[in-house]
Image (cartoon, helix red, strand yellow):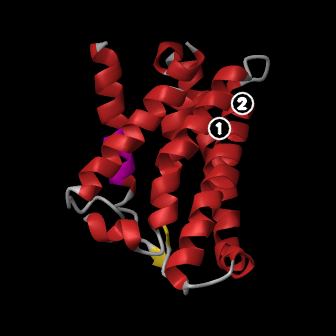
Amino acid sequence: MERNFVMIALFAALIAALGLVPKITLASGVPITAQSLGVMLCGTVLGARRGALAVLLFLALVALGLPLLSGGRGGLGLFVSPSAGFLIGFPIAAFVAGLITEKLRAMSVFWAAALGAAIGGILVLYIPGIIGMAVTLDKSLPEASLLATPFIPGDLIKSVLAGAITGSLAKARPDSVLSRA
């Protein structure tokens, strides 16, 4: 039980640390950050439940005003910004990435984690993200979808990185990859 709390807190801190990587803000107002890699890793390493809890802890700290998002952003106002849909989708994305990594035991850890990260961290995350952009920017869903396309190449790279990191961690310290324990 203690180990679970420590891992959840550690991965919430990982997402915050990835916010130190400078952001690139697009015309949509939604920045490209490394934090979505942290969300993917929460799921692929911790598993569905613990991964989602780590992201929820991180979001609670952001909502309290801690400047943990890239660029030193924090506060409730972010939950009504163009990024709101992505923030709301973070715990769902981590859950799905973890669930896929947990269920695909016949695959190598790398492939299961990369696939989980791609489905959870891209496909699932983009649904609330695009809806959030459409609502906050007063765009149609197709227009908001076009605004999201610049994120796809970077997120595909992050998915492969999540698979590689999770796979390497599974080889070096198998007990630390809770999604496969």
On the image, which quarter does residue 105 sit in?
A: top right
What residue is disc 1 on?
Answer: 163
- Does 66 sit left or right of 68 as displayed? left
User: Label 2 near label 1: C-beta < 8 Å?
Assistant: yes
**Residue at (55% x, 87% y) in the render:** 27
Q: Secondary structure at mark 1?
A: helix
On the image, which quarter does residue 67 sit in?
A: bottom left
Considering the whole magenta stretch, tell me its main secondary structure: helix
From the top left corner, tell me how far across and down residue 158 is, in percent: 61, 52
Q: What residue range appears in magenta?
A: 12-17
Q: Quadrant of the C terminus?
A: top right
**Which one is in front in this view, the residue at disc 1 or the one at disc 2?**
2
Which of these two is toward me, 157 or 95?
A: 95
Residue 113 visible in this rendered orientation of the protein = yes
Name the disc covering residue 112, or none. 2
Q: Is residue 177 magenta?
A: no
Eyeballing the image, is 34 above or below 81?
A: above
